[in-house]
């Protein structure tokens, strides 16, 4: 599903949609994660493919037709494994996947309609987990040999060497990204702007060097309370430049969730 702005919807909007999906999945006893998430560190593209293949069931939100999401949906269909496709009511069907049932929800997230959507989504999840959604998308077009990943045991030394080589490639890629970012951002700043960037750099360093997730949670809460929006944007940019993609993703999701809660609180407090 999208997590950044797309189709005239803000990150806060997608954070709300994610919360709705998680409510349904957890109510059916599922452990929920984004396909890009994992406990261990590693190459994010590899992690996505592994999660797409190993997950018991996938909920794919194609709202806005985000290219990455559409590609990931195609991979899951190629694996011929259970998937529930959802979209908002402003997104058109795609020609190739139109024959597959899509659950629809209102983009404005109207309460009553969302309640109906949650009931339908839970039914689909329950059926998928029980193996009752046995219809194969691929078999609608003929007989195919689906992709599978063969697992094999390797010596610990061979595994470590491979992991180190993989990290080297990722570090090289990140260094190129950072170098390009630095080159394109080289410009003269006012003393105030330079001071702000220096302060944000220190905040990013402190956050990334935090010893555990609990400390990171406390620092995020403090930053959200003390920093203005421009400083928070710079903080995210600084973490990206340092190659901290997983930490940046968690920061963006938490920021969007907090903003959505604040928006809901403000709307409830307005007089009729």
Image: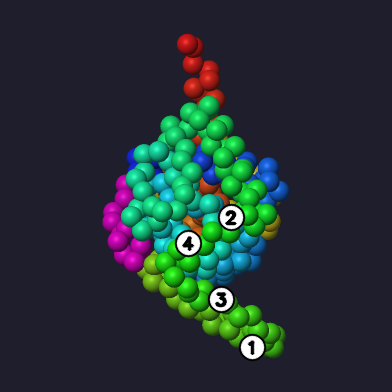
- Marks 4 & 2, CB-CB < 8 Å contact: no
Instruction: Name the residue at 47% across, 66% down.
Output: 138
Q: Secondary structure at mark 2?
A: loop
Is residue 267 shown to the viewer in this render? yes
- Marks 1 & 3, CB-CB < 8 Å contact: no
Q: Which residue is mark 1?
A: 158
> Between tags 3 and 4, which lies in front?
4
Q: Find out whether residue 123 is within the magenta segment.
A: no
Q: Which residue is mark 3?
A: 148
Residue 133: give its label: 2
In the image, residue 59 lies at what x, y percent? Answer: 54, 52
In the figure, is residue 57 to the left or right of 267? right
In the image, residue 143 lies at what x, y percent? Answer: 47, 73
As rendered, which of 24 and 141 lies closer to the eye? 141
> Between tags 1 and 2, which lies in front?
2
Looking at the image, how many numbered discs can be counted on the residues?
4
> Between tags 3 and 2, which lies in front?
2
Q: Of the residues under marks 1 and 3, which one precedes in the sequence?
A: 3
Name above or below for residue 77 compared with residue 225.
below
Q: Secondary structure at mark 3?
A: loop
Instruction: Name the residue at 47% across, 49% down.
Output: 101
In the figure, is residue 75 to the left or right of 221? left
> Between tags 4 and 1, which lies in front?
4
Q: Of the residues under marks 4 and 1, which one precedes in the sequence?
A: 4
Q: Secondary structure at mark 1?
A: helix
């Amino acid at each position: 599903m999208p997590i950044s702005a797309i189709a005239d919807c803000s990150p806060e909007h997608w954070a709300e949609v994610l919360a709705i999906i998680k409510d349904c999945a957890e109510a059916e006893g599922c452990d929920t994660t984004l396909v890009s998430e994992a406990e261990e560190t590693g190459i994010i593209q590899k992690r996505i493919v592994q999660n797409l293949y190993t997950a018991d069931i996938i909920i794919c939100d194609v709202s806005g037709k985000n290219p990455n999401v559409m590609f990931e949906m195609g991979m899951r269909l190629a694996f011929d494994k259970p998937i529930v496709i959802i979209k908002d009511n402003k997104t058109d069907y795609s020609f190739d996947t139109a024959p597959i049932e899509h659950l629809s929800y209102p983009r404005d997230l109207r309460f009553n309609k969302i309640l109906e959507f949650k009931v339908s989504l839970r039914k689909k999840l329950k059926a998928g987990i029980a193996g009752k959604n046995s219809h194969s998308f691929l078999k609608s077009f003929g007989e195919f040999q689906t992709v599978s990943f063969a697992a094999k045991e390797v010596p610990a030394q061979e595994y470590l060497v491979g992991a180190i080589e993989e990290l080297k490639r990722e570090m090289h890629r990140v260094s190129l990204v950072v170098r390009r970012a630095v080159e394109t951002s080289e410009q003269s700043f006012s003393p105030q702007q330079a001071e702000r960037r220096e302060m944000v750099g220190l905040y990013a360093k402190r956050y990334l060097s935090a010893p555990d997730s609990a400390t990171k949670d406390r620092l995020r809460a403090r930053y959200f309370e003390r920093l203005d929006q421009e400083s928070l944007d710079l903080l995210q940019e600084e973490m990206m430049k340092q190659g901290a993609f997983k930490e940046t993703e968690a920061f963006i999701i938490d920021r969007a969730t907090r903003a959505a809660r604040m928006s809901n609180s403000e709307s409830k407090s307005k007089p009729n």
